[in-house]
């Protein structure tokens, strides 16, 4: 029973890895053709050793189950599955074909293997992973720990997975409608097609692909949307960066990231600078404060006899207002009159703490 449970959980992890990043494949070849209006075609061919495919497909009831799952996930796509051999290894080959009508649909297609931001216009193409820092034990860390534990119980799968990771071949090839003048990939002979290979795609620091189609001459600085300079927020901030020129770098509190779409949720002050290839830069600063103010001296639903001294503070954005029965009150004030009271303290981010108490 325990072995069956381990096998089922491990199969699910393999499926997640297959659908999320295709990192366990012998090869993953993506071909994209882009037109100047943002429409185009997408074809991805993933070749996986049969031993790993069979283990992953169990949870979906075999090959037909995986094909059905993919067709549901990618409406309108043509899914082909066939047996093949690669370097003498029995493999399964999964081919996904689809067309997209504009840049928005193209971004959705590119996001099939990860959460990404895609920008494409007459000046440049850019695809980057969305920046989503997670404090403490992230989902990825938990997934890695679980994979490590489960692989340890299956020597054959460990050998197969290790071998494939060492020899995997990953390529993304995009044919653009314009001549490429700058890229972090390899320009092909036609001057319009760029290839990114395994080394470029799986390096820890390489989360962004780009290609420029001319000189970046605009004097317009990058523009932030989703947050305002100097504002305090009581929840996470989704910050998009648009740029007339190809974006060069983004600095967050002194750390460089390669993304034009940021989801920030941890509390604190954020100082962000975005610089494009033309040298234009923009800055924004804001705070995320999700913690309610602290109140001392009175507690909710408590009844007191005699005078109470009320104190309140906020370590994040600071106190905006404090009212006792709708009248402004300062921290350190004393209350002795008998009656029912409602204290409402609000910080500058909008977090509100309410305490109701009585004095008799």
Image (cartoon, rainbow, N blue to C red):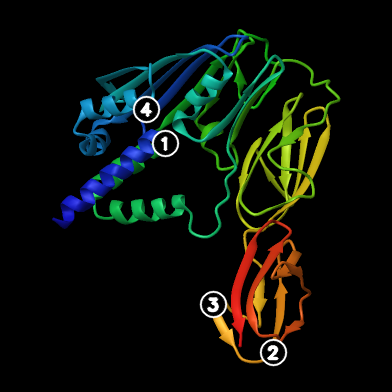
User: How far is the residue under mark 4 from the one under mark 1?
Assistant: 12 Å
Circle on res. 73: 4
Q: Secondary structure at mark 3?
A: loop
Of label 2 and label 4, which has the lower sequence position? Answer: 4
Pointers 2 and 3 in contact (CB under 8 A)? no
User: How far is the residue under mark 2 from the one under mark 4?
Assistant: 64 Å
Residue at image location 36% in from the left, 40% down from the top:
16
For the residue carrying disc 4, how many other residues have a C-alpha within 10 Å: few (<14), some (14-19), or many (20+)? few
Of label 4 and label 1, which has the lower sequence position? Answer: 1
Of label 2 and label 3, which has the lower sequence position? Answer: 3
Residue 88 visible somewhere in the drawing: no
Residue at image location 78% in from the left, 35% down from the top:
275
User: How far is the residue under mark 3 from the one under mark 1?
Assistant: 49 Å
Of label 3 and label 1, which has the lower sequence position? Answer: 1
Give the residue number, with chain letter if any, for mark 1.
Answer: 20
Give the residue number, with chain letter if any, for mark 3.
Answer: 301
Give the residue number, with chain letter if any, for mark 2.
Answer: 307
336 relative position to 15: left or right: right
173 relative position to 83: left or right: right
Along the line of sight, which residue is nearer the eye, 27 or 292? Answer: 292
User: How far is the residue under mark 4 from the one under mark 3?
Assistant: 50 Å
Of label 4 and label 3, which has the lower sequence position? Answer: 4
Q: Quadrant of residue 186?
A: top right
Q: Where in the figure is residue 67, as x and y percent of width and height?
A: 27, 25
Please state, as top left, top right, bottom left or bottom right, where the N terminus lies in the image: bottom left
Pair 2/4: label in front: 2
Please state, as top left, top right, bottom left or bottom right, where the C terminus lies in the image: bottom right
């Amino acid at each position: 029973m325990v072995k069956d449970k381990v096998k089922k959980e491990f199969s699910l992890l393999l499926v997640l890895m297959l659908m999320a990043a295709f990192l366990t494949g012998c090869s993953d070849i993506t071909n994209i053709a882009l037109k100047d209006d943002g429409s185009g075609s997408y074809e991805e061919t993933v070749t996986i050793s049969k031993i790993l495919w069979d283990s992953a497909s169990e949870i979906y009831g075999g090959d037909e189950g995986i094909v059905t799952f993919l067709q549901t996930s990618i409406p309108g796509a043509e899914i082909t599955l066939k047996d093949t051999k690669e370097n003498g290894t029995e493999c399964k080959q999964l081919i996904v074909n689809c067309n997209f009508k504009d840049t928005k649909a193209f971004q959705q297609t590119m996001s099939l293997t990860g959460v990404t931001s895609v920008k494409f216009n007459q000046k440049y193409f850019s695809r980057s992973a969305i920046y989503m820092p997670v404090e403490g034990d992230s989902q990825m860390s938990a997934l890695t720990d679980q994979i490590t534990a489960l692989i340890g119980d299956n020597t054959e799968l460990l050998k197969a997975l290790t071998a494939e990771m060492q020899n995997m071949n990953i390529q993304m090839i995009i044919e653009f409608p314009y001549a490429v003048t700058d890229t972090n990939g390899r320009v092909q002979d036609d001057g319009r097609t760029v290839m990114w290979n395994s080394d470029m795609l799986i390096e820890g620091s390489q989360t962004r692909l780009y290609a420029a189609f001319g000189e970046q001459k605009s004097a317009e600085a990058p523009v932030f949307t989703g947050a305002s300079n100097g504002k305090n927020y009581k929840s996470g901030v989704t910050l998009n960066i648009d740029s007339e020129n190809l974006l060069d770098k983004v600095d967050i509190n002194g750390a460089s990231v390669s993304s034009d779409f940021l989801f920030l949720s941890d509390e604190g002050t954020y100082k962000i600078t975005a610089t494009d290839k033309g040298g234009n830069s923009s800055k924004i600063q804001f705070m995320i404060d999700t913690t309610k103010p602290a109140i001392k001296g009175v507690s909710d639903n408590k009844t007191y006899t005699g005078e109470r001294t009320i104190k309140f503070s906020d370590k994040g954005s600071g106190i905006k207002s404090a009212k006792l029965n709708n009248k402004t009150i300062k921290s350190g004030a004393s209350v002795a009159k008998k009656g029912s009271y409602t204290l409402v303290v609000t910080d500058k981010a909008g977090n509100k703490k309410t305490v109701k108490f009585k004095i008799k």
